[in-house]
Image: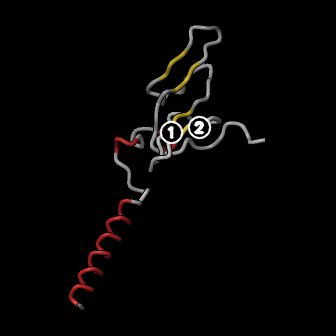
Amino acid sequence: MKAGTALIIAALLAFASFSAARMDASIFLPSQGRVGRPNGGKPWPCCDMCLCTMSIPPQCRCMDVTDCCYPDCHNCVCTKSIPPQCHCLDVINDFCGDRCTPES
């Protein structure tokens, strides 16, 4: 019985250490949008309308419409209207960041 209990405890400790390593949010792969971009890997300096998935880490996109895309945006779509209305379609694996306008 003691050998079985020791085996169960060892298995639980191994599982706990594995699950703790998976939850470390400070470890990101280069493919997760954090390399080569200023502002913490975000293609925009601020965002008022952030749309995120409920995954871990979250996959977020700023839904703000501006008159031009920021230089760090890799996938920008603009209308041909005057003034143009542009939207950055980049998705990052982090929250959008600070708001552009204060919350009311």
Residue at 44% in and 50% down: 56
Where residue 16 appears, as percent x and y from the top left, is 35, 71
Residue at 30% in and 81% down: 9
Residue at 74% in and 42% down: 103
Where residue 95 appears, as percent x and y from the top left, is 53, 45
Mark pair 1, 2: CA separation: 7 Å
Q: Look at the numbered disc 2 and give the secondary structure of its residue.
A: strand
42 left or right, relative to 2: right
Label 1 or label 2, whichever comes before in sequence order: 2
What amino acid is at disc 1?
Cys
Q: Do the residues bearing badges 1 and 2 touch, measured as CB atoms within 8 Å? A: yes
Where residue 85 appears, as percent x and y from the top left, is 61, 17
Residue 96 numbered mark, or none: none
Residue 60 numbered mark, or none: 1
1 or 100, nearer to the observer: 1
Q: Is residue 10 above or below residue 94?
A: below
What amino acid is at disc 2?
Cys
